[in-house]
Image (cartoon, rainbow, N blue to C red):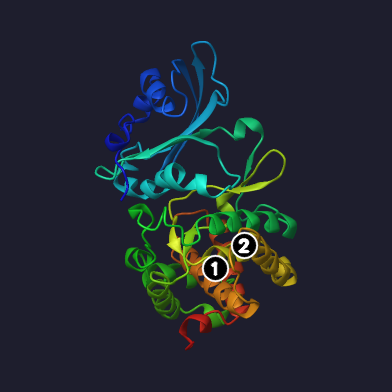
Amino acid sequence: MDLTPTDRGGPPVPDTLDEAYTPAWLSAALGTRFPGIEVTSVTPGPVISRVATNARFHIECAGGAPDGLSPDLCIKGYFTEYGKPYRHAGVPEAAFYRDVLGLTGMNTLRCVYADCDTETSDSAVITEDVVARGAEFLDARSAYTPDQCAQSLGELAALHSGTWMAPQVADLASLAPRFQMYTQMRGVDEIKVNFDGPIGAGAPDEVRDSQQLYDVYSQLSRQVATESPWCVVHGDSHIGNVFLHADGHPSFVDWQLVQRGPWYLDVGYHLSSCLTIEDRRAHERDLVAHYLEQLAAGGVEAPSTDEAWRGIRRGMVHGFYLWAITLKVDPEITSRLIERLGTACADHDAYDAITEET
């Protein structure tokens, strides 16, 4: 069961960005990690506000910032009137940073505060501002090499092996499987908007049937909800949820879809979304073998190659469905991802990996 801020002894999660920017609240929030810190001033920086708000800022502290804390920070929350109806989406992400990340050894955003209130669904995450340190955030238009994909698959292997059937996360409500929710929120109508228009034109004909994709994914969502062995999965591991550190190493962000599930949902989705179709076809076998080696190095008995590839095919469908129901993203990005993921599904007869008897 997840803890509320009151249970944890931390400050209440802020309701607005103005409240989050106050030295008093920041002192209390950062004080959970850096006892005795006194924030004396806050300088707001750039703000990106869509559904969630991501706001960069700089702090000054009495006696200087404590060792281990950058004064350049970023807070993420659902602070606007538009965002508040969706604030429940931030609870799993905040709980991940608070309760799960430390188990994994992943190289991702360095979180210095994370909390959520399961009663109000308010949440806030403060991380170091990697943009100030030269980081680059990616999307489907970004160049991404097979070598970089091998590195990001290594990060997923760290997440999966670190949480593989882990009792510490087995009962966390924030990680309860939610795959079936994606068939309830959107479905055939949204898929048809994409498949019947220019955005979905790049998907091969054999997978561009709205009702078929919905039915196949509905079956998959029921299957994976109770599948074992499970681990913690990112859930939305496409290239747009990756950034490059200044040294070029890739890391994952945006953990709203994090939950318990089978490893392959992340892996099939990721390698099919981050690479061009040509690079994926040329390197996918080696990349999956690399992931399995990394999983085994993390202490997990890796599946056989045949078993792994059945899972990878299912993960391709997971990603294809999530982008087929996506409407409010730059059409160029949606189009590229639907083409990449749909082609991967067609290349591997991926629907059969869900519907065939085992």
| Residue drawn 55% across the image and 23% down it | 71
Q: Position of residue 203 (x, y in %)?
A: 57, 73
Circle nearer the N terminus (1, 2): 1
Rendered image: mark on residue 345: none
Residue 178: name its quadrant: bottom left
- Please give the residue where the numbered disc 1 appears in the rendered image: 264
Rendered image: mark on residue 295: 2
- Above/below status of 243 relative to 189: above
- Above/below status of 277 relative to 252: below
Between tags 1 and 2, which lies in front? Answer: 2
Visible in this render: residue 235?
no
Pick the front one: 138 or 91: 91
**Residue sitting farthest toward the bottom:** 357
- Above/below status of 265 relative to 216: above
| Residue drawn 32% across the image and 36% down it | 8
Q: Position of residue 170 (x, y in %)?
A: 39, 58
Q: Secondary structure at mark 1?
A: helix
Q: Amino acid at mark 1?
A: Tyr
| Residue drawn 34% across the image and 37% down it | 80
How many other residues sit within 10 Å of disc 2, few (<14), some (14-19) or many (≥20)? many
Are the residues at dot 1 and dot 2 in contact (C-beta closer than 8 Å)?
A: no
Is residue 328 shown left or right of residue 15?
right
**Residue sitting farthest toward the top:** 63
How many other residues sit within 10 Å of disc 1, few (<14), some (14-19) or many (≥20)? many
Visible in this render: residue 297?
yes
Q: Amino acid at mark 2?
A: Leu
Q: Secondary structure at mark 2?
A: helix
Residue 12: name its quadrant: top left
